[in-house]
């Protein structure tokens, strides 16, 4: 396993990050324990979770994943310092989480305290804003005119960001969190936080996690360039496009218990004719080179310049082992050339 510094922080994280959002719905406590234990044997020291998990989110599963991790930490107290634990505060829109309110300095402090209780730990290594208060071009909202930027009140949002940073600063000062990060945000969001941090001597954002895969490359080049130049770790989530890039959903297939059989908060917007065509094209490349489609997709993300650590998830140890193994051997140059040609044919299939 390779390790890399997490942005401008002092943390050294594995190039593979263990995602946890299936724990509590698709996976139970024992299965989660097995995944954490196995991941550690493979050198993974980075685990990502969120107060909103398990997925799909609802009031009954809210906080369940953090509780599962908390039970593991309680059973393995000597291993806490062997992991870099990341969690996230939910943004607005879920009425069962603080009434669906916006993120503020006060809600940050409340959410951190609640997460620490569920996680049964004294500190969180990386605490992230799951999505911003304002609408951002994520979850298939990246097409022209889906967002009305000219009516956006930037100054008002900057004031809110300033307040959020004060809440994060209080948590850092209290030793409850070590570093802060973003998720599902934009270059504008990154730069406002950086500027406010510098002007007011408040914690700097050290990372951002956004969706990134062969089917969703909109962060290249502009956001990733921003991250590279500002020393912000870029953490791709859903590198397999919620399982589409395994090929298991081709021709309308819905394997029992798989992600696409569950109700999705934003719908199955990745399920398009163009996605089907793109997946088939990538599958042909994988078959020509005698590798799995998942290996092709994961190894491709890993080699993208500017990627820090890729967040993977699995519902079985077999899947997890295959996904981790995908990072062991880089793709051959000729495979990357074929992928690049296909990517130009299907640059944004959903």
Image (spheres, rainbow, N blue to C red):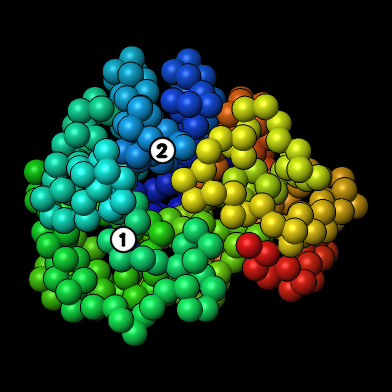
Residue 344: percent from left, percent from top = 74, 73
Q: Nearer the viewer, mark 1 or mark 2?
A: 2
Write down the residue under mark 2: 57
Secondary element at image label 2: loop
- Check the picture and name the quadrant holding the C terminus: bottom right
Query: Which mark is on residue 279?
Result: none
Residue situated in front as seen by the camera: 103 or 50: 103
Q: Residue furthest bottom?
A: 150
Please tell me whether residue 42 is drawn above or below residue 126 in the rendered image. above
Residue situated in front as seen by the camera: 217 or 248: 248
Please tell me whether residue 225 is drawn above or below residue 172 in the rendered image. below
Residue 190: percent from left, percent from top = 33, 69
Which residue is rendered at x = 27% and y = 38% of the image? 96
Spatial CA span between label 1 and label 2: 17 Å
Residue 327: percent from left, percent from top = 64, 46
Residue 332 appears in the picture as rendered: no
Residue 293 appears in the picture as rendered: yes
Could you classify mark 2 by the number of other residues whose Cα lies within 10 Å: few (under 14), some (14-19), or many (20 or more)? Answer: some
Write down the residue under mark 1: 132
As drawn, is 348 to the left or to the right of 249?
Answer: left
Which residue is rendered at x = 51% and y = 19% of the image? 31
As drawn, is 22 to the left or to the right of 66?
Answer: right
As drawn, is 332 to the left or to the right of 118?
Answer: right
Residue 313: percent from left, percent from top = 54, 38
Which residue is rendered at x = 16% and y = 66% of the image? 160
Q: Residue furthest right?
A: 288
């Amino acid at each position: 396993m390779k390790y890399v510094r997490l942005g401008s922080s002092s943390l050294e994280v594995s190039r593979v990050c263990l995602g946890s959002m299936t724990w509590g719905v698709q996976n139970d406590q024992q299965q989660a324990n097995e995944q954490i234990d196995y991941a550690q044997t493979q050198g993974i020291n980075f685990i990502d979770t969120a107060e909103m998990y398990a997925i799909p989110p609802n009031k009954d599963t809210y906080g369940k994943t953090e509780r599962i991790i908390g039970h593991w930490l309680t059973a393995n107290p000597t291993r806490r310092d062997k992991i870099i634990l990341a969690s996230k505060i939910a943004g607005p829109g879920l009425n069962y989480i603080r009434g669906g309110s916006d993120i503020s300095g006060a809600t940050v402090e409340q959410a951190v305290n609640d997460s620490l209780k569920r996680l049964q730990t004294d500190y969180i290594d990386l605490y992230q804003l799951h999505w911003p208060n304002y609408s951002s071009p994520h979850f298939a909202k990246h097409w022209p005119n889906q967002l009305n930027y000219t009516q956006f009140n930037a100054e008002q949002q900057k004031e809110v960001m300033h307040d959020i940073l004060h809440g994060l600063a209080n948590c850092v000062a209290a030793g409850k969190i070590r570093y802060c990060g973003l998720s599902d945000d934009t270059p504008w969001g990154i730069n406002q936080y950086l500027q406010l941090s510098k002007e007011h001597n408040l914690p700097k954002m050290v990372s951002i996690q956004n969706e990134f895969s062969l089917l969703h490359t909109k962060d290249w080049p502009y956001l990733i360039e921003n991250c590279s130049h500002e020393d912000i770790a870029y953490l791709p989530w859903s590198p397999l496009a919620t399982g589409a890039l395994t090929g298991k959903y081709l021709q309308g297939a819905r394997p029992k218990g798989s992600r696409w059989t569950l109700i999705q908060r934003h719908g199955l917007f990745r399920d398009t004719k163009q996605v089907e065509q793109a997946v088939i094209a990538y599958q042909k490349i994988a078959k020509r080179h005698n590798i799995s489609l998942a290996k092709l997709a994961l190894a491709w993300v890993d080699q993208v310049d500017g990627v820090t650590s890729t967040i993977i998830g699995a519902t079985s140890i077999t899947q997890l082992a295959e996904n981790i193994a995908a990072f062991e051997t880089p793709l051959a140059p000729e495979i990357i050339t074929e992928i690049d040609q296909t990517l130009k044919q299907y640059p944004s299939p959903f």
